[in-house]
Amino acid sequence: MGSIDGLVDDGGVMITADIGSTAAAVNHYGTTSTKTTKTAAVEYGMGLSPLLVQAEPDVPPKITPQPAPSAKAHSEDDIEASGCDSRGIDGESLTDPPPDSKPWIVTPLIESKALSKAAGCRILLKLDLLQPSGSFKLRGISTYILHHLKNHPRPHLSHFYCASGGNAGLACVVAATTLGRPATIVTPTTTSPRMLRRLRDAGAAAIIVHGDTLAASERFIRDVLLGQGGQGERDGVFVPPFDDALIWTGNSSIIDELADQMPLDRQPDAIVCSVGGGGLLAGLLQGIRRRCSPSAPATASSRHPWSPRATTVVAAETEGAASLAAALHAGRPVTLAGISSQARSLGCVRVAQGAYDEVMGSVATTTAQQQAAAEGPTIPSSPVKSVVLSDADAARGCVVLADEDRLMVELACGVSVAVCLDGRLPKALGRDVTPDMTVVIVVCGGCDVDVGRLAEWRQTCGGLVGV
């Protein structure tokens, strides 16, 4: 075991950063300490004690992979004999991923008997919390990374960078490492120790703490790490957390799966989803429009295209993070003064323009949709209903899901569950709810939760009574 200025190196590949300022370190148990040092280290690979470089805007870090003293190179024969994966310790892929590989999985669709009884109709749960990264974000971000690996001039040298306080960063790391490439995550200072540990455990090549907002973290990536003279200037790829057509296309795969999983020839009467920046919402609306196209392929469960406007999408937000509701009220996307909700994953001060356009029924401009429009009539957007609930409502949704269906999710997901509690669903849909209706909740997941936090929420918000 070695150390740099008292900071522990447990023997993986270290990334050094000349920062000339204070380095913030989070140890294995999540406590924070600081040391003033010219050179600090960011964990890479399998070490147990992460060090997070807290960069200052005027002192860009010069990041260079360096093997720790105990590290050694391995041949392809060594790796094959060991049963390990094909990633070398310098992060370069020794073998290309299969052309059909995708890091996300098809997730189950199950009924929640307790929620069905509470809501007065059939409630189905689309379990995207079971994605390898813990949330739906793996779909869109994997699609984005796969696209760039196929089109990058030197895919074997590509390095992915994402600004995230949690779930998007986890998705980026899981997708990139699954495909044999490294990922660096820049996170704001508001990121919880729990999420920092999870980013480390997922295999982030580097974790850099910079700025008080995601916008500041993103600027640091674009201007410093990927800017002229930056370490990723040539082969670095910025990964947007939600605001990109490729991200929405990946998220739309939820609808493709629903078409296979719904009861025979049944279309959901409603789909409930949470909204932060709008990437999930945009993907769902695109997927529904594609499923309604006359050219939509038949599936085992859906022998015919879906009917336009037959599925209402309920967009759920929490008070203090309701950027979509603010945009609908103003008639255009607006920037919130700040985020006061505890649902951190919904903490986007401005909803994506593309998501807003989808909600308003504007024709999107992705290549697939342009082609679909050329083949037939334009498919109208599904009706969208905006619902804003409190953090307490979202917390109760989390508790109910844990108690009744043994599923643990964060507040950003719990708000969608809360839409179906306490008689809210008829108001959200704008019509009566009947037993023959089917409503799908996208259980989007999220990793910023543990049993301790659930216990706190149960104390303050309670569970499902009388069911």
Image: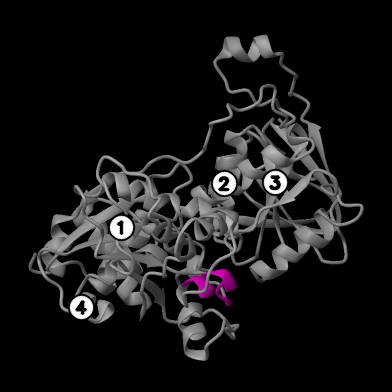
Q: Position of residue 134 (x, y in %)?
A: 44, 48
Residue drawn at x 72%, y 41% as measured from the top left: 151
Q: CA distance from mark 2 to mark 4?
A: 35 Å
Residue drawn at x 60%, y 55% as measured from the top left: 367
Along the polypeptide, which appears first: circle 2 or circle 1?
A: 2
Of all residues shown, which one is farthest toward the bottom? Answer: 330
Q: Position of residue 270 (x, y in %)?
A: 27, 66
Q: Quadrant of residue 336?
A: bottom right
Q: Position of residue 274 (x, y in %)?
A: 40, 67
Residue corresponding to mark 2: 143
Q: CA distance from mark 3 to mark 4?
A: 44 Å
Is 266 left or right of 293, judged from the image as shown? left
Residue corresponding to mark 4: 426
Locate the N terminus and report the quarter of the image it occupies: top right
Give the label, 3 or 2, closer to the camera: 2
Q: Are marks 3 and 4 in contact (CB under 8 Å)?
A: no
Q: CA distance from mark 3 to mark 2?
A: 13 Å
Looking at the rendered structure, the secondary structure element under dot 4 is helix
Give the label, 3 or 4, closer to the camera: 4
Of all residues shown, which one is farthest toward the left? Answer: 466
Which label sits on residue 306?
1
